[in-house]
């Protein structure tokens, strides 16, 4: 198989949860693949401004907000899929009725939160994500929201998805919260947007991920690679399980599949 396109999740895949940095081996492997003519793409639940965590490494395109906003390598917009207005209005009415829930809202250029929740803000800092700005959640009525996150456990998530978000889907890459996206919008559809733009066949793709939000992408790619610390459901969706990112998982897997030359000892 000749690999022509690589898709990488960020957190836990390219960037270590332990250090919040990309290991040198991963950065060098991505650059080596691109130098050989392979297109490289980011596929993340982060919003566009949060992609800077990968440093100065160049990519050919970006899937952000779990597919909510897609861009080419120069950050020209290729596609946008905001949350449905009816689900936003249903959520706001539920909050206005006095229910308590911490929600973050991802716009294209910023992230806001509906209340001061120190546990949530501390978690954001721990994950290396910029702290959201406290704003009136009703701002979401006047500007497209490309992703929301609700800070609840899995049981409450299922209930709220039924009651508040019937036109959306949820996914998790962290046990503390679930990402909410418009139904039919995920990293898989983001892949298709970028592949169509560059004229690359799906049969020539490889995707790397470690979270529940990566499962559609791993199943869709010709070769789906789960990182070593991924949950069992993510591993089950993949064709190959790589070592953890801190154990040179990206580089070792690209070498294994002949995408890049083996590193010198």
Image (tube, helix red, strand yellow):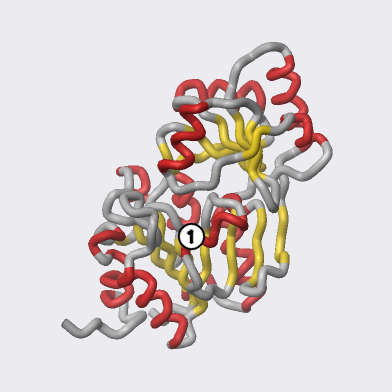
Q: Position of residue 177 (x, y in %)?
A: 48, 33
| Residue that lies at the very extreme toward the bottom in this rendered image | 36
Q: Is residue 193 left or right of residue 18?
A: right
Please state, as top left, top right, bottom left or bottom right, where the C terminus lies in the image: bottom left
Is residue 241 visible in this depiction of the protein? Answer: no
| Residue that lies at the very extreme toward the top in this rendered image | 98
Is residue 259 visible in this depiction of the protein? Answer: yes
Quarter-wise, where is residue 149 in the image?
Answer: top right
**Residue at 60%, 50% in the rendered image:** 65
Q: Is residue 87 left or right of residue 240?
A: right
- Above or below residue 26? Residue 188 is above
Q: Position of residue 192 (x, y in %)?
A: 60, 64
**Residue closer to the observer: 110 or 254:** 110
Tag 1 secondary structure: helix
**Residue at 53%, 73% in the rendered image:** 59
**Residue at 66%, 25% in the rendered image:** 164
Q: Position of residue 232 (x, y in %)?
A: 30, 43
Please state, as top left, top right, bottom left or bottom right, where the N terminus lies in the image: bottom left
**Residue at 63%, 33% in the rendered image:** 113
Total tally of numbered discs in the picture? 1
**Residue closer to the observer: 134 or 233:** 134
- Above or below residue 232? Residue 19 is below
Residue that carries the numbered disc 1 in the rendered image: 53
Q: Is residue 55 left or right of residue 150?
A: left
Quarter-wise, where is residue 243 in the image?
Answer: bottom left
Q: Position of residue 66 (x, y in %)?
A: 57, 51
- How packed is label 1: few (under 14 Cα within 10 Å), some, or many (20 or more)? some
| Residue that lies at the very extreme toward the right in this rendered image | 142
- Above or below residue 176? Residue 64 is below
**Residue closer to the observer: 179 or 130:** 130
């Amino acid at each position: 198989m000749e690999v022509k396109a690589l898709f990488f999740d960020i957190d836990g895949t390219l960037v270590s949860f332990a250090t919040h940095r990309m290991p040198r081996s991963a950065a060098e492997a991505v650059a080596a693949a691109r130098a050989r003519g392979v297109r490289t793409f980011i596929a993340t639940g982060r919003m566009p401004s949060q992609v800077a965590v990968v440093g100065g490494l160049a990519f050919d395109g970006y899937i952000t907000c779990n597919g909510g906003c897609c861009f080419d390598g120069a950050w020209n917009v290729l596609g946008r899929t905001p949350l449905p207005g009816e689900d936003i209005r249903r959520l706001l009415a539920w909050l206005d009725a006095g229910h308590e829930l911490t929600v973050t809202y991802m716009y294209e250029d910023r992230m806001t939160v509906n209340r001061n929740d120190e546990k949530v803000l501390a978690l954001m800092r721990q994950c290396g994500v910029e702290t959201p700005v406290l704003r009136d959640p009703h701002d979401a009525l006047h500007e497209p929201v490309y992703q929301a996150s609700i800070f609840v456990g899995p049981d409450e998530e299922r209930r709220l998805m039924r009651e508040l978000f019937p036109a959306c889907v949820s996914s998790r890459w962290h046990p503390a919260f679930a990402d909410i996206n418009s139904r039919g919008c995920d990293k898989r559809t983001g892949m298709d947007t970028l592949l169509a733009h560059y004229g690359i066949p799906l049969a020539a793709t490889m995707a790397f991920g470690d979270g529940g939000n990566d499962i559609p992408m791993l199943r869709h790619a010709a070769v789906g690679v789960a990182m070593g610390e991924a949950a069992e459901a993510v591993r089950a969706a993949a064709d190959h399980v790589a070592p953890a990112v801190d154990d040179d998982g990206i580089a070792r897997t690209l070498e294994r599949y002949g995408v890049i030359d083996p590193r010198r000892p």
